Amino acid sequence: MKLYPFLIFLLFCFPLFGQKKNEAYQYHIRSAGSPLKIDGIVDEPAWEAAETAGDFYMVLPMDTSQARLRTDVKMTYDSQHLYIVAICYLDPTGSGRPVVQSLRRDWDFGKNDNFIFFMDTFDDQTNGFTFGANAVGAQWDGLLYEGGKANLSWDNKWISAVKNYDDRYVFEAAIPFKTIRYKKGITRWGINFSRQDLKSTEKSSWAPVPRQFPTASLAYTGILIWDQPPPQVGTNVSIIPYALGGLSRDYQREGQGPTRFHGDVGVDAKVAVTSSLNLDLTVNPDFSQVDVDQQVTNLDRFELFFPERRQFFLENGDLFTNFGYAGIRPFFSRRIGLGVPINFGARLSGKLNKDWRIGVMDMQTGKVGEVGLPAQNFAVVALQRQVFARSNIGAILINKESLNYTPEAGKPAYSQYNRNLGLEYNLASSNNQWTGKALFLKSFSPGVRSHDATHAANLLYNTRRWLIGGQYEYVGQNYNPEVGYVPRRGYFRWNGQIGYTFFPKGGSILSHGPTLQSTYFYDKSFRQSDNETFLSYLITFRSRATLNGWVATDYVRLLQDFDPTNLGLDKLKAGTRHHWKAFGADLISKPQSLFTYSVSTRYGGYYADGTRLNVTSQLGYRFQPYASLAVSTSYNRISLPEPWGKVNFWLVGPRVDLTMTNTLFFTAFMQYNEQAKNVNLNTRLQWRYQPASDLFIVYTDNYLPGSLSVKNRALVVKLTYWWNV
């Protein structure tokens, strides 16, 4: 199947042009005439003089009326800060306190009463920033990409306060112009304000947004009109040094290895080359404070994906990491520096103008003599050009190079180089109902001259009632992205889905409807290797609880030997065929309750005419806003012929989150993984003693199940400081 006809179809056959949907919703921002104090008390003359944005529209439960709850928003600015205040009135018929998880930053949107806002600072309806807080003042900030997805791992410097009254809560914030990126001289930004109140189950926004889209959708922002261009803040350089000390011990080494002390220092820097282009620098970075990946029971034939959490890779990270699809990523930043020291790195990213974005990254890692790994250089260049209303064309070049490398006898061999070149077209119609992508990738490796390319395309139509989509992929047998994530190669894949949603006029059910999807895999000779057909029915209740039931049929022809338990007992042979049917259900409780739960079940066939039962649950209770307790449990019972027999896997993970204040957090969680034969304990204390400046104390243990004898343990103390030059 050729890529080019499909690409032309995407380019010319859909409504790509059109006026901005909410052009009529305009907020005029004027310079503050008096000083402002961020305290949640709206008594300054500057707020009296500011325009008010009100009359919000309901998004949920239904997007066909005005919001029931009143929300008033005001904005102003001075030479250094953008200011915003939101007065969120409570339901007079309700009772009790607002619903929140905790005081922890970047909370779960669906489980908190909150106010957040979205800024499209280039008015391109594609990239932007989001800030806000829940009803007790815990902050939320993130980067917006791909028209409305939020990366909450981004963290920056700003201040806010929330004050609670009997009939309302007030959110007030000051965002330094140095924190955000925007085009010099631009006098209109995209803007929208979002409010969620779980007791009334109402989500609303100032500029109306269809219910099938998040309120972060930049296609539906209103217009922020400046009385003059936003101020240029002059030199914008941030230096972020760190110092750490740690103790570690490996108890599994002969003689229970000695306790080792580790001390280190390093520095990051952010330099605003222009108001829209940022240079990130790092020397000897350390990421010991980053959350530990949650363990999973791995019954998959292919590598699992874990997201990037390290701060250095996040700003404008979509330029690099969102190139491609979930299972076809030519660049995956976690390939850099995990288990290998990063000596230094630099990254230039941002907007050249309204239409052009650029990302250039260069990272240098050190060598690891024990395994013969040489020092390596990772260079990435990404370029993106906006076309039509909200679409764009992108290109990426990735180069991994081993420096001064000579293979050593008895040690693993590493490639001298690996390169990837990619082109993609991202479709986004002006109303966001049509989205899609067309992609071409080619890798370059020593001695490889054929079957080293990948191409794929998809198209999705999404309205209030209909969800219709299709996708195809081809990944060559020799396609090799050493700095990417492509768990499967040498296949063709076709996928189609169709869904419909009904909206009852009354009763406890808000919406319900079926979705049917089917996926087919073929090998390079066009012989079918996999198929899954999946029919589900989702019921959404007015309380925000959901119930989803499903049935599925699977067919697998193994292309390589595979152990269905991943325990190393034995392997099913390549070429063997396996069929089964399965069914299950997923239930998620309403988020308003202090006690919340979710349960997911699956029962049916498995490889080699076996059976598999899976029950996954999560139970939580919160003593809002100071403590949250949760227990995650996954149980798998697999019945197979000998030599596997009956196998049981438990994965249990209790977690405690304490938020003494909105600047002092403690987290502790334990994970018991029966499949991996490991018990892991991780605790982390974080004190944000100044905006974006932290003290971390992290303690980790790994134990053997049963005896609970210690395998290894470590303690790290890390101090960071954000200094604006």
Image (cartoon, rainbow, N blue to C red):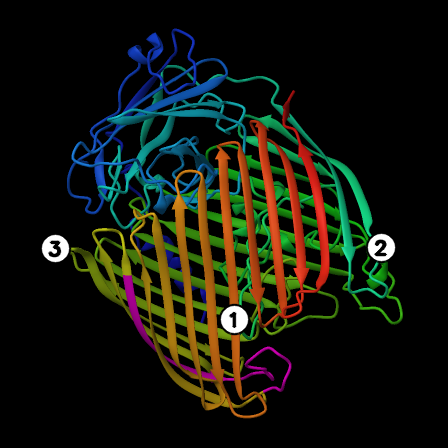
- The nearer-to-camera label among 3 and 2 is 2
Label 1 element class: strand
Question: Which of the two discs, 3 and 2, labels the residue nearer the N terminus?
Answer: 2
When the figure is inspected, residue 387 is found, relative to residue 330, above or below; the finding is above
When the figure is inspected, residue 453 is found, relative to residue 648, above or below; the finding is above
Label 3 element class: loop
Name the residue at 31% across, 56% down.
589
Gap in angstroms between the C-alphas marked 3 and 2: 66 Å
Give the residue at mark 1: 650
Give the residue at mark 3: 507
The magenta-colored residue range is 547-571
When the figure is inspected, residue 53 is found, relative to residue 525, above or below; the finding is above
Q: Residue furthest bottom?
A: 642
- Considering the image in quadrants, where does the N terminus appear? bottom left
When the figure is inspected, residue 580 is found, relative to residue 668, above or below; the finding is below
Amino acid beneath label 3: Gly
Q: Residue furthest left?
A: 505
For residue 258, the mark is: 2
The one nearer the camera, 348 or 712, is 712
Amino acid beneath label 1: Trp
Label 2 element class: loop
Image position of 54 (left or right of 81) = left
Can residue 309 be seen in the rendering of this structure? Answer: yes
Gap in angstroms between the C-alphas marked 1 and 3: 39 Å
Name the residue at 82% across, 52% down.
259
Residue 294 is situated, as x and y percent measured from the top left of the image, at 55, 58
Residue 275 is situated, as x and y percent measured from the top left of the image, at 54, 25
